[in-house]
Image: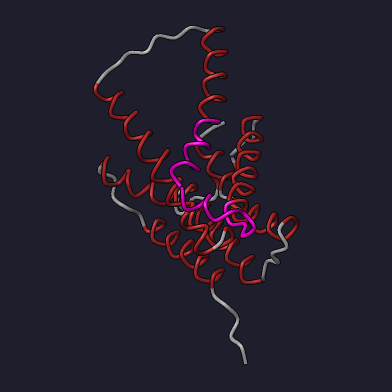
């Protein structure tokens, strides 16, 4: 797949979260949540298109996008499992053990596929300071802090609301590239931010009671 395809497919996370909550976990999605999902996805599309909608028309889907779609659905299912009240409270209290168990399974799967890949086509790793720094960042940031933060967020606000925050990722990526690569933010970044945050606000707001 391509980065733009991956981000496009992953932006459907709120949709998957709402659908799975409705079908499998008895959580009925409200019209405000669907409206928030539409606003959030529109903000992601604005970032990806850079304000030029013709860019999205030229996108071609490939088999890799199906894998990303399956991963998005699996992530939504995982998020709902994190919030089940029937689970023993010790699972969430001992978060380090819980996270370690997840990573152990991930390491087995990733290690197995890597072994198969390298058996077919051997590769040589060129070690450098940049490589080590990247590994340390991946080990601490996305692998530890991100999972822990996501778990806490899901427990506090629920999977449906947490899913909308995931669509801030492409916006953060664009802003970080502006800082690190010297690219000035564009007006569409601001509009996308308003749409995505607006989706979060709309989806999490409650209908006033009379």
Residue 112 vs residue 70: left or right?
left
Above/below status of 110 relative to 51:
above
Above/below status of 152 relative to 157:
above
Q: Which one is nearer the viewer's eye here, 7 or 156?
A: 156
Above/below status of 140 relative to 52:
above
Q: Residue 135, percent across and down?
A: 34, 28
Give the quarter of the image for residue 20: bottom right
In the rendered image, residue 127 lying in the magenta stretch gets the answer no
Residue 73 vs residue 171: left or right?
right
Q: Residue 5, percent across and down?
A: 56, 39
Colour scheme: secondary structure
**Residue range (magenta):** 82-105
Residue 129 vs residue 123: left or right?
left
Question: Dividing the image into 4 quarters, which one contains the C terminus?
Answer: bottom right
Please report the residue visible at 69 percent of the width from the left and 64 percent of the height from the top: 27
Q: Residue 63, percent across and down?
A: 66, 29
Please report the residue visible at 26 percent of the width from the left and 46 percent of the height from the top: 179
Q: Which one is nearer the viewer's eye here, 68 or 89?
A: 89
Q: Residue 159, percent across and down?
A: 57, 58
In the rendered image, residue 97 lying in the magenta stretch gets the answer yes
Please report the residue visible at 33 percent of the width from the left and 35 percent of the height from the top: 137
Above/below status of 134 relative to 14:
above
Q: Main secondary structure of the magenta part?
A: helix
Q: Residue furthest right?
A: 23
């Amino acid at each position: 797949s391509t980065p733009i395809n991956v981000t496009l497919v992953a932006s459907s996370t709120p949709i998957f979260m709402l659908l799975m909550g409705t079908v499998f976990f008895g959580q009925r999605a409200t019209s405000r949540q669907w409206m928030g999902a539409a606003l959030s996805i529109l903000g992601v599309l604005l970032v990806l298109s850079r304000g030029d909608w013709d860019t999205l028309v030229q996108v071609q889907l490939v088999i890799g996008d199906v894998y990303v779609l399956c991963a998005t659905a699996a992530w939504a299912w995982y998020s709902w499992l994190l919030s089940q009240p029937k689970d023993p409270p010790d699972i969430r209290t001992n978060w380090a053990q819980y996270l370690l168990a997840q990573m152990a399974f991930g390491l087995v799967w990733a290690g197995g596929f890597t072994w198969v890949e390298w058996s077919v086509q051997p590769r040589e790793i060129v070690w450098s300071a940049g490589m080590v720094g990247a590994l340390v960042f991946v080990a601490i940031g996305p692998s530890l802090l991100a999972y822990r933060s996501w778990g806490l967020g899901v427990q506090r606000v629920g999977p449906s609301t947490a899913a909308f925050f995931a669509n801030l990722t492409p916006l953060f990526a664009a802003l970080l590239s502006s800082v690190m690569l010297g690219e000035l933010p564009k007006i569409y970044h601001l509009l996308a931010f308003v749409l995505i945050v607006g989706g979060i606000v709309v989806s999490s707001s409650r209908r006033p009671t009379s």
